[in-house]
Amino acid sequence: MRVNRTLRQRLRDAADGFRGRPPAPGGQSPWELLAHCAPDLVTAHAPDGRIRFASQAATRLLGRDPAALEGMTPAQLVHPEDLGALQAVFRDASYFGHDGAATVRLAHGDGGWIWTELRCRRTPPGAGHDDIVAVTREIAAFKAQSQALVEARDAALAATKEKSRFLANMSHELRTPLNAILGFSEVMAREMFGQIGPRYQEYALAIQDSGQHLLDLINGLLDMSKIEAGKFELYEELFALDDVCEGAARLVGPAAERGGVAVAADVAPGARMAFADKRAVKQMLVNLLSNAVKFTPPGGAVLLTAAAEGKAVMLSVSDSGTGISPADLERLGRPFEQTQSAQGKEGTGLGLALVKSLAALHGGEAQISSVLGEGTTVRLLLPHAGVELPVIKSTVVPLRGAA
């Protein structure tokens, strides 16, 4: 205990010396000598902010003699737009003892302004005066970097807006002729106005398939653009999830039949109804089923399941296809990213990215698991889509006159 008291006394004596008692030779206190050695500008201020002391760093930082700063008020040194912030910091330090910091522009001796960061603290009780000690450093490089980041962000936002505007205009220009192509090719394929022959009917079907593929690509680009811009709105409603699952399976049926792939849907009784954006859910399922069919060899199978998990709905698409390598799994789901096995196949790499984004808009997520050469499973968790259907109890009422 005696050693501890001795140590505390020595620390107290040292602190008293750095508070200005007693002055060192030449009339300067030890803390003033130390301040002159610091690379940052050290200043002592009266409660109203008037400078009582400035270190030698004033010459390097402000191009001014330290003695010339003594007696100057903040209004004489600080940019008018930053004066209020500095005065608030000094006021809090003087009256409430709060440490403070402010980013202000200070007047340089050459007539310009430099960006600085000032941190201040009131001297502790018992120091014999109520000075506020401040440490100031130049942050011009930091401010320039921050400004460059702001300008880069603004440029990126402007580019995003231009991209969205371009895609919106492009969609209108392309959708109109594509819808006409799809409509007329369907008329020809069904031979609504007379026979055209098997070869021409085959051509008409090919035209219709190509037009539908182009339309799907355009819609995917537009949806991703809206999501990135934060303008994709969900229209949640109560709908029959089993109908949507069966409809999605039917849509990929022709492609699955051509590839020799079996597609099946299995919806659990508790998941026959859901509350979500019906169009978005159908789009997610069609995208996942299309990918599964695309990468499943002939003789393989694709299974779509839906199950209720409390208030959530779990949708799952599994296939017995080529699978995905661990390296590809890390980057899969980014816009326009494709796996090595997808090279040479139709698609832009937007399908899974759209699925993940649409799931996130529902507050959920998409989880991918795969074994190379064995198949892939994508699970969609929609945490708020579950619907508890009421149990209807029937009551048997005997007919009058029944024996």
Image (tube, grey):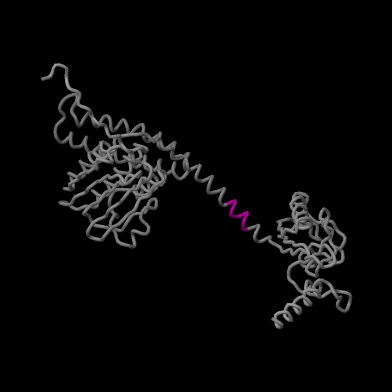
- As drawn, the residue found furthest toward the top would be 401
Range of magenta residues:
145-151
From the viewer's perspective, is 136 left or right of 169? right
Q: Total label count?
A: 0
Which image quarter: residue 177? top left
Q: Position of residue 372 (x, y in %)?
A: 25, 61
Q: Residue furthest bottom?
A: 3
Quarter of image, res 376: bottom left
Q: Is residue 271 magenta?
A: no
Q: Which residue appears at 23% of the width and 52% of the height?
A: 319
Quarter where residue 131 is shown: bottom right
Residue at 84%, 56% in the rendered image: 73
Q: Is residue 346 above or below residue 32?
A: above
Q: Position of residue 361 (x, y in %)?
A: 42, 44
Image coordinates for residue 87, horizontal then vertical, percent:
78, 53
Q: Is residue 149 magenta?
A: yes
> Looking at the image, which residue sits at the far left?
403
Which quadrant holds the C terminus?
top left
Main SS of residues in magenta:
helix
Rendered location of residue 335, percent (x, y): 39, 50
Q: Quadrant of the N terminus?
A: bottom right
- Foreground residue among 168 and 311: 311
Front residue (pair 76, 364)? 364
Residue sitting nearer the eye, 64 or 358: 358
* Residue 236 relative to residue 187: left or right: right
Q: Residue at x 18, y 34 (%)?
A: 201
